[in-house]
Image: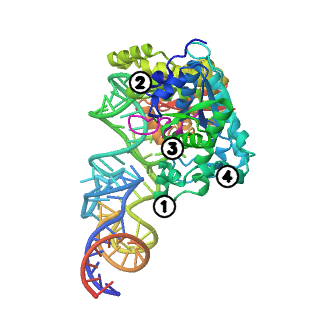
Amino acid sequence: MSVAPDLLAEFEARGLVHQSTDPAALREWLATPGRRIYAGFDPTADSLHVGHLVALMLLRRVAAAGHEPVAVIGGATGMVGDPSGRSEERNLLSPTELAANIAGVGGQIRAILAAAGPAGPLAGRVHVVDNADWMRDVGYLAFLRDVGKHVPLAQMLGKDSVKSRLERDGGLSYTEFSYMLLQAWDFVHLADVLDCRVQIGGSDQWGNITAGIELGRRLRGCDLHGITCPLLTKADGTKMGKTAAGAIWLDPARTSPYRFYQYWINLNDDDAGRCLLRLTELPLEEIRSLDEARAATPAARETQKRLAAEVTRLVHGEEGLAAARQATDIFFGAEITALDDAALAEIFADVPSGEFPRSALDGDGLPLVDALEATGLAKSKGAARRTIEQGGGYVNNRRVADVAYRLTPRDLAGAATLVLRSGKKSYALARFH
RNA sequence: GGGGAGUUACCCAAGCGGUCAACGGGGUCAGACUGUAAAUCUGAUGGCUUUGCCUUCGCAGGUUCGAAUCCUGCACUCCCCA
C-alpha cells in the first residue's frame, strides 16, 4: 500500500467537514494506511434513503484513500431509538420489523460499499458489523457498572439532542435518553476490537460521537476522534431527498430508478453543484470544469445529468441507470411504438393505470375522454374534453386534437397496453385484458 | 337573555327579481415561452348522452310567469349590550 492520500484534505475540499476534533491529531493518525473509520446506520426502515448517501460516500472515500471503512448497523441501537434531530419520541420497532430492516439496510450498505467507482474497485477492505452482536449479551447491571458509571449526568444533560427535547412538551423517555450511552459504547468497543479510532456522521451525530470519545478517554485513556459533515439541505432549506411525494429511497421497490434519476436531474444548479462534490467520486478537476460549464451554458444541464448518472449508477447499477435513461427518453421524448408490455410496465412503474376489458376497443372503440377519466388523468369527462381541446391530450405521446377520438386496437403500444398522457408530465397506462 | 351582521363553487370574495353555472383574486389544469428551473403570457375551471339538458348560491318551506337575489322557519358563525 502506498502512502495514503490526505483524507481530511479531501473531505474539506468537498465541503464535507462540519465539525471535527483536533485536525492535527486526526491527520497524523490518518497518515498510516489501513486505518479503520466507522459510521453507523440505524435500521429505522427497511431501506436507506438519499439522506444516508453522504455517510455511505464518506465510507467509500475512506476506502478509496486506502483505509478500511467500518459500517455499523444499529441492530441494538435501533431497538432504542436515537433522539438526535428528532422533535418527538420514536415508536419502538417490533423485533420482526427490526430484523427485516437490518436485512434490507445491511444489503444496501454492502452493495454500495462493494460497487466500483469511476476509478475502478475500491482499495480498502470493508467491514460491515451489527452492534447487536456485542450489545445483545451485555447485562443491564454490568452495563450500568462498566459504562454508566463513567458518564457524568451533567455531560449527558448538556447534549443538544437532550436539551432541546427537555424544553419541549413531550420531553423524552429514559430509553431515548440512554441512547447515547449505547453509541458511545459502540465506539469504545470498535476501538478495542478493530483499533477503530475515528467516527464520522452527520452533524446531528456530534453529541453521540463526542460521548463516545469522552467514554474512551475515561475508560481506556485512548484518543478517539470524530468528524461530522453538514446535513445535506437544498437551497430552499428543505432536507435533501424529501419531496412532496415522500422520501427518495434507495430501494428500487420504493423509489424506481427512474424517479431516483429524475430527482437529481431536477435539482437546481447550486444544489446540484454541491451534490457533485459530496455525493460523487468525480475528481475535483472534473467537478471544476462542470462548474465552469454550468456557469457558461446552464441550459445544457451537464451538472445535473452527470450527477444523476453517477449517483444512479452507484445505487442501481449500470442496468438501473440504463432503465432510468430509457424511461427518461420516453417520458420527455418521442412517440411510443412497438414496446412490449413488460418494458412498458417497467418504465411506467410509478404511473397509475386503468384496466379495461379487451372488448372495449372493438367496434367503434373506447372514447379517449372515457379512458382519460377512468385512469384518473382527468377528474371528469368535462375536464378530459377540455384537456384535449387545449392540446393536452396524448396517446402514446402523440397529441390527439379530436375530442371525439376513440381508442381502437391500432392504438396499442404493446400487446395489450397503451400510454395516455395529459399535459407535459402526467401519464397513465391503460391495460386491456 | 336583548340587538346587529353574516352563511355563494377548492379557498377568498362580488352579485341583491329575469341577459347567472353566477364578476374578480388565489389555487388548480392545459397551452406558449424555457434549462425537465424560476418568472411571464394565454385559455380553461359544476356534471352529462354538450349548439342542448341536468344539478348548484347554509337547510326546509313559501311568494312569483321567473329567485343566489323577496318572505317565513330552522341551523351555524361573528360583533355589540347584559
Q: Is residue A344 visible?
A: no
Instruction: Describe residue B25's horizontal placement relative to residue A111 as left or right.
Output: left
Instruction: Tell me the residue that label 4 is attached to.
Output: A145
Instruction: Kindly identify which numbered label has been placed on residue A207.
Output: 3
Closer to viewer: mark 2 or mark 4: 4
Query: As shown in the figure, which amino acid type bears the numbered disc 2?
Result: Gly
Q: Residue A251: x percent and y percent?
A: 62, 32
Residue sitting at x 55%, y 26%: A57
Instruction: Tell me the residue that label 2 is attached to.
Output: A273
Residue sitting at x 59%, y 25%: A315
Whether marks 2 and 4 lie on the same chain:
yes
Q: Residue A16: x percent and y percent?
A: 46, 29
Q: How far is the residue under mark 2 from the one under mark 4?
A: 49 Å
Return the residue nearer the eye: A427 or A254.
Answer: A254
Q: Residue A308: x percent and y percent?
A: 50, 23
Whether marks 4 and 1 lie on the same chain:
yes
Name the image quarter holding residue A127: top right
Which SS does the magenta portion mostly show? loop
Return the residue nearer the eye: A122 or A149.
Answer: A149
Q: Are marks 4 and 1 in contact (CB under 8 Å)?
A: no
Query: As shown in the figure, which amino acid type bears the numbered disc 4?
Result: Arg
Instruction: Tell me the residue that label 1 is attached to.
Output: A169
Query: Which region shows up in magenta?
Result: A231-249
Of callouts 2 and 4, the N-terminal one: 4
Q: How far is the residue under mark 3 from the one under mark 2?
A: 29 Å
Q: Are marks 4 and 3 in contact (CB under 8 Å)?
A: no
